[in-house]
Amino acid sequence: MSVNIERAEDIKTHAWGSEAYPLERPFVRTYRRPWSRLQSIWDVLLKLKSHRGAVVGGIVVLIYVVCAVLAPYIAPYSPDQVALTKRFVAPSLAGAHPLGTDQLGRDILTRIMYGARVSILVGVLTIAISMAIGVGLGLIAGYFRGAFDKIMSRFTDLLLAFPYLIFVIGMMSVLGPGFWNLIFALCFKGWVEFYRLTRAEVMSQKTCEYVEAARSLGRSDWAIMVSEILPNIIHSILVLGTLRMGNMIVMESSLSFLGLGIPPRIPAWGSMVSDGRRYMLNAWWVATLPGLALVILVLAINLIGEGLRDVLDPKLQEG
């Protein structure tokens, strides 16, 4: 005796296990989400505790974030406070300027702390906007395919033909220096990688059994995309976002170094390195310490990304 079930409510009304329907409920075994093992952020954090690199990177990033957020309250000086009588004071932990001063007598430690605010904010905003655009378009193109997928694929191929740094330099030359101009220029091409990854993952996941089970229960295409497919590919997107955040911070510093990023009146690591490179022989700390702060932050973010990849990638877990 065959039964045609089209809605989830119909399943509950049938007397499964009775003489008429001796089989077990079919959706109990087949309709299982692979993401169920990592349903909460707490589960991910517990798994990251065993990854030493991710723990070290998380501690370093946390220190940077705390210093950036509390910079107006814990910084010893104002970032624009000029003291020409204290030009090129060498770093000294016992002195009034632990990391020294620059060519205008400004405290380097203070300017590094304020520069962290710019770099972290640019990295977070750029990745968040790029991820939202790329994942949204990738879900639609990978699931529905058709003309939209062909148009988006050709457009992304066109964007990928230009080197990222050259492309952003050209846009900033037209738009001019500025915080939001920088965000726009970085996001204009930054979403492409998220789009391509999401599209490929959706195309492979939409033929899985749990998607077919969701269709048999009468769920709409948009519900399947958002609540079924997306949770099962989010681990790859998070890993890519974490690794690309370091690239965005380096890109912002590179543009600021060239004078095309953050305006000079705002402390930024790239502009600090650019100003101090002329004094490398006499005052190495002016350019070296901001560059070292940039390297440490990017390395810490990459360590977190590697840890997330090891924890969330099911292929690595099976191996």
Image (cartoon, helix red, strand yellow):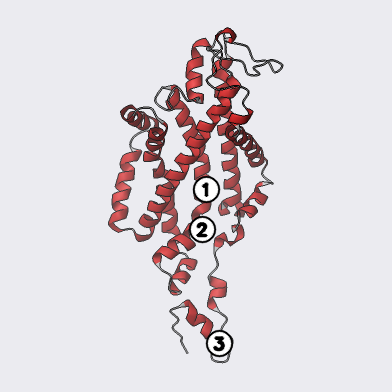
Dot 2 lies on which element? helix
In the shown orientation, is residue 110 left or right of residue 157?
A: right
Q: Is residue 46 above or below residue 122?
A: below
Residue 213 image point, x, y percent: 47, 71
Q: Compare residues 277 and 206 and report the one nearer the observer.
A: 277
Precedes in sequence: disc 1 or disc 3: 3
In the shown orientation, is residue 49 left or right of residue 198?
A: right
Task: Identify the amino acid type marked 3.
Answer: Ala
- Can residue 207 be spotted in the picture? no
**Residue at 44% across / 58% down in the picture?**
204
Q: Are marks 1 and 3 in contact (CB under 8 Å)?
A: no
Dot 3 lies on which element? loop
**Residue position marked by numbered label 1 in the rendering:** 238
Precedes in sequence: disc 2 or disc 1: 2
Q: How far apart are the alpha carbons under marks 2 and 1?
A: 11 Å
Task: Identify the amino acid type marked 2.
Answer: Pro
Q: Is residue 176 above or below residue 274?
A: below
Residue 148 image point, x, y percent: 30, 54
Precedes in sequence: disc 2 or disc 3: 3
**Residue position marked by numbered label 3 in the rendering:** 15
Residue 151 image point, x, y percent: 28, 50
Q: Which mark is residue 231?
A: 2
Q: What is the quadrant of residue 180 in the picture? A: top left
In the shown orientation, is residue 113 left or right of residue 212?
A: right
Q: How far apart are the alpha carbons under marks 2 and 3?
A: 32 Å
**Residue at 32% across / 48% down in the picture?**
153
Q: Are marks 2 and 3 in contact (CB under 8 Å)?
A: no
